[in-house]
Image (cartoon, rainbow, N blue to C red):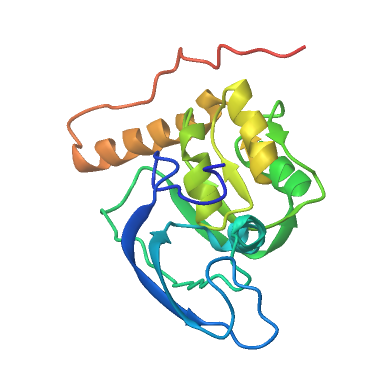
């Protein structure tokens, strides 16, 4: 599956293939899949390269060795760094101390004054790094997972995004679209008032969260 290896951004099953000639000499006790032991062999081969996250690497190597016909397939693992394209819409950071997903959800609910906060995942799961994206930003789920986040805080998410979070093993904290953006509007209004003293700017006093609970 592309979620395990070969994922670049929103593209899956990405790879690079380079044909070449491989050579090997099987010593006593070997059973080459191509050619025979005790003789220098030259075989037309393909070098296959693909991206794999560190968290999926062990599973990918096990699957590769199980599927490869060679007794000793040649495997190289290189650490790569993604080039920065400037600041994105989301943010991530490490917590000052570990916290469970359940406690994180309660903390977010208290800070955003949103008692109806929902979450996806095991409440006892430990979270040390968290991704944040306001509004409805579950499309950052895989980015947060690749960055090593154990949880993503966003306003809301589609049902299938919640299922994907469970499959990836990353928590989702969903306090609501309104709750994750309202404080930003209030802060922006304050900044505009400070910068333009002849204007009176305020966040809407009529707007409220349209979602209600019983």
For the C terminus, the image quarter is top right
Whether residue 24 is visible, yes or no, is yes
* Residue at 64% in and 64% down: 58
Considering only vertical position in the picture, is 213 above or below 29?
above
* Residue 121 falls left or right of residue 135: right
Whether residue 110 is visible, yes or no, is no
* Residue at 56% in and 63% down: 54
| Position of residue 135 measured from the top left corner of the image (x, y, whole percent) | 47, 29
Asked whether 75 or 43 is in front, the reply is 43
Asked whether 188 or 179 is in front, the reply is 179
* Residue at 51% in and 73% down: 74
Tell me the quarter of the picture where residue 167 sits: top right
Considering only vertical position in the picture, is 71 above or below 89?
below
| Position of residue 208 measured from the top left corner of the image (x, y, whole percent) | 52, 15
Tell me the quarter of the picture where residue 193 sits: top left
| Position of residue 96 measured from the top left corner of the image (x, y, whole percent) | 62, 66
Asked whether 158 or 34 is in front, the reply is 34
* Residue 143 falls left or right of residue 17: right
Considering only vertical position in the picture, is 89 above or below 40?
above
* Residue 153 falls left or right of residue 188: right
For the N terminus, the image quarter is top right
């Amino acid at each position: 599956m592309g979620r395990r290896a070969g994922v670049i951004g929103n593209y899956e099953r990405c790879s690079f293939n380079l044909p070449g000639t491989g050579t090997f000499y099987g010593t006593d006790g070997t059973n080459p899949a191509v050619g025979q032991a005790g003789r220098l062999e030259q075989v037309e081969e393909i070098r296959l390269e693909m991206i794999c996250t560190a968290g999926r690497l062990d599973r990918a190597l096990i699957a590769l060795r199980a599927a490869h016909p060679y007794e000793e397939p040649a495997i190289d693992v290189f650490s790569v760094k993604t080039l920065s394209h400037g600041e994105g819409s989301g943010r991530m950071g490490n917590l000052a101390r570990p916290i469970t997903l359940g406690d994180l959800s309660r903390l977010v609910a208290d800070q955003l004054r949103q008692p109806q906060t929902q979450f996806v995942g095991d409440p006892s799961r430990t979270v040390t790094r968290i991704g944040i994206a306001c509004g409805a930003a579950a499309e950052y789920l895989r980015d947060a997972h690749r960055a090593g986040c154990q949880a993503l805080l966003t306003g809301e998410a589609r049902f299938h995004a919640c299922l994907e979070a469970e499959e990836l093993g990353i928590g989702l904290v969903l306090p609501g679209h309104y709750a994750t953006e309202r404080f930003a509007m209030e802060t922006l209004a304050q900044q505009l008032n400070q910068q333009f003293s002849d204007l009176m700017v305020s966040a809407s006093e009529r707007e409220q969260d349209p979602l209600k609970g019983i």
